[in-house]
Amino acid sequence: MGFFSILADTNSFKPLENRLVNKNHGFLLMNGSDTIYYNFGYDVDNLSEMDKKIIFYPGDVSDMWNIIDSTLINKEDVVFVNKPNYDIDELRTQNVRFIQVSGFRVKITFPREINKGGLTGVYIDSVKKTEGGRLKFNLYAKDLDSMQNEELLNAIQTLQFH
């Protein structure tokens, strides 16, 4: 893994050498089955959940997709609601918290409801500053069960950078 290590149970996290994209992007295998992705560079996803566009429609919203051309609007990006002042937090699937890990302020993201899938991971917006800008880092896995989710969250807190 070169520039970082996980100090948690090292038997649980193994690099997948044959799936290493390059030294800055790759995969780890957690407990022999779940893939953990990591990225290090100038343009790294910050693991933020994308908010859907909320459209208020005072009528029956259940039939809206029957009258709208779905080739023009992606159903994954839009939600129709019939109550004013709808709270976007009702739609979010991820929780976020900020903590200190290895001297860095990091963003941790994890699913609100484990059984509905989601993303568990960490994002650091400035692991190192260079002439080219700030080098960023993320490490994440998708659709973990509750035990795997807890194991990855604990492992994130042991990250060390070299």
Image: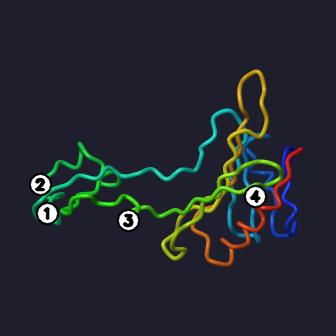
Q: Residue at x 26, y 46 (%)?
A: 73
Contact between marks 4 and 3 (CB within 8 A): the answer is: no
- Residue type indicated by callout 3: Glu
Q: Which numbered marker is on residue 14? A: none
Contact between marks 1 and 2 (CB within 8 A): the answer is: yes
- Mark 4 or 2, nearer chain start: 4
User: Cα distance, mark 4 to mark 2?
Assistant: 45 Å
User: Cα distance, mark 4 to mark 3?
Assistant: 33 Å
- Mark 3 or 1, nearer chain start: 1
Q: Which numbered marker is on residue 90? A: 3
- Residue type indicated by callout 2: Ile
Residue 144 lies in quadrant: bottom right
Q: Position of residue 86 (x, y in %)?
A: 28, 60
Q: Position of residue 35 (x, y in %)?
A: 68, 61
Residue that numbered label 1 is attached to: 63
Judge from the rendering whether residue 71 lies leftward or rightward of residue 114; answer left or right.
left
Discs 3/2, front: 3
Q: How is the image coloured?
A: rainbow
Residue that numbered label 4 is attached to: 28
Q: Position of residue 28 (x, y in %)?
A: 75, 58
